[in-house]
Image: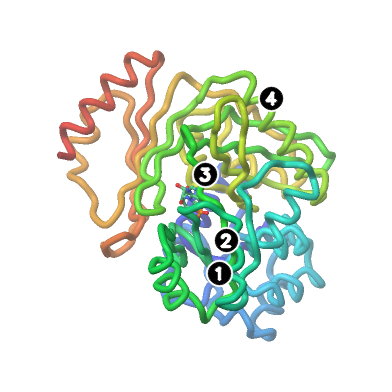
Amino acid sequence: MKVGVLGGGQLARMLAIAGKPLGIQLICYESIENPCANSVANIIKGDFNDENALATFAETVDCITLETENIPLTCAEFVAKQRALLPNEFTLKITQDRLYEKECLQSLQIPTAKFHAINTWDDLETALNTFNYPAILKTRKSGYDGKGQAVIHDKQGAVNAWEQLKSHELILESFVNFASEVSLICVRAKNGEVKFYPLVENEHREGILRLSKAPFIHPILQKKAENYANTLVTHFNYIGVMAIEFFVMGNELIANEIAPRVHNSGHFTIEGARTSQFENHLRAICGLPLGSTETIGFSAMYNLIGEEPVREKILSIPNTYYHSYGKAARPGRKLGHITINALSEDALNDSVANYLKIIK
Ligand code: AMP
């Protein structure tokens, strides 16, 4: 079986690695030279608007998936005419635009922060009159890792944010004073079966995910998250892995973002669950039975951002796993991740303390 992936970054790389034992070969379509998935997958290089190259790519594979929502919708629609695109182009259209995404969540009675479409300075001034400070101005499309966002604390902040972002289509969101951030990773098979991983607790700094801890044990929130996820995958007629990020406010969940793909907060599943999110995504889109989403003990996943630590020291911590994506170091760039596993929460906390001492 040959699976095509739109994009060739670290998510495609981890999908390709998961595909090897299943005999599934990955072919990535990428516009950049030597993408991260290069060493484990075949790459077809082409622009995301180049229909000839996209047609060649589509002919080479049995089905197509994606590792990023930041690809032109026209590209997804074009390849979907030739091969099954899983998840489908309708899901991509909604989830690549924060405004459509929030409108969709609202229409399905899934709570979100207050939001308003912003096209002009007047829109921003009017919306700010009905929102309390702080508020967040975000680009509707192409934002990731906190890029394309500005927190507005006062009138002058609004002027600055507008100057910074006015060339884009924008959305203003109220600032949610959350207690914590969590995500739910789920997978839906072709026969409609849906499986859920336990909730993951996430810590972000400067808009970038730093740490994910799993499982986040909270039966009420788990049930709510699973109900919301079920509503969404049914609405989209979704096949594959989907992640939903939420803000936690007491016993309530406020949906922030839907990722129509494998997700950074699910990396712990490689060693911390019976079946990884990458394998389950491939199983789902290839029409294979889903694997168990049960977690094995407790996990902490740290992203390696900007630089990589000395491996020898990290690997001396029991049940600790190092994933380097083979990328050149650059400030703010995700270069790899580390997963620490343990059979009890106490043992995990000891290993995490050890890890934090080493990387200091
Ligand atoms: P996003 O790109 O929307 O996932 O935002 C990145 C991070 O910024 C989130 O994980 C939060 O930590 C923070 N953030 C985004 N939107 C909001 C909001 N409306 N209220 C509070 N924090 C937010």
Q: Position of residue 73 (x, y in %)?
A: 69, 72
Q: Real-space Cα distance between discs 2 and 1?
A: 6 Å
Which of the two discs, 1 and 3, labels the residue nearer the N terminus? Answer: 1
The secondary structure type at the circle numbered 2 is helix
The verdict on label 3 being within 8 Å of ligand 1 is yes
Answer yes or no: do the residues labelled 2 and 1 have beta carbons within 8 Å? yes
Proximity of marks 3 and 2: CB atoms separated by less than 8 Å: no
Q: CA distance from mark 2 to mark 4?
A: 36 Å
Mark 3 or 2: the one toward you? 2
Which comes before the other along the chain, label 2 or label 4? 2
Front-lying residue, 236 or 179: 179
Residue 125 got which mark? 1
Marks 3 and 1: in contact by CB < 8 Å?
Answer: no
- Identify the residue shown where x is 62% and y is 18%: 219
Sequence-earlier tag: 3 or 4: 3
Give the mark nearest the N terminus, 3 or 2.
Answer: 2
Label 3 – label 2 distance at C-alpha: 17 Å
Taking the spot 74% from the left edge, 72% from the top edge, the residue there is 79
Which label sits on residue 223?
4
Residue holding disc 3: 176
Q: CA distance from mark 3 to mark 4?
A: 22 Å
Per the image, label 3 sits on a secondary structure element best described as loop
Which picture quadrant has residue 222?
A: top right
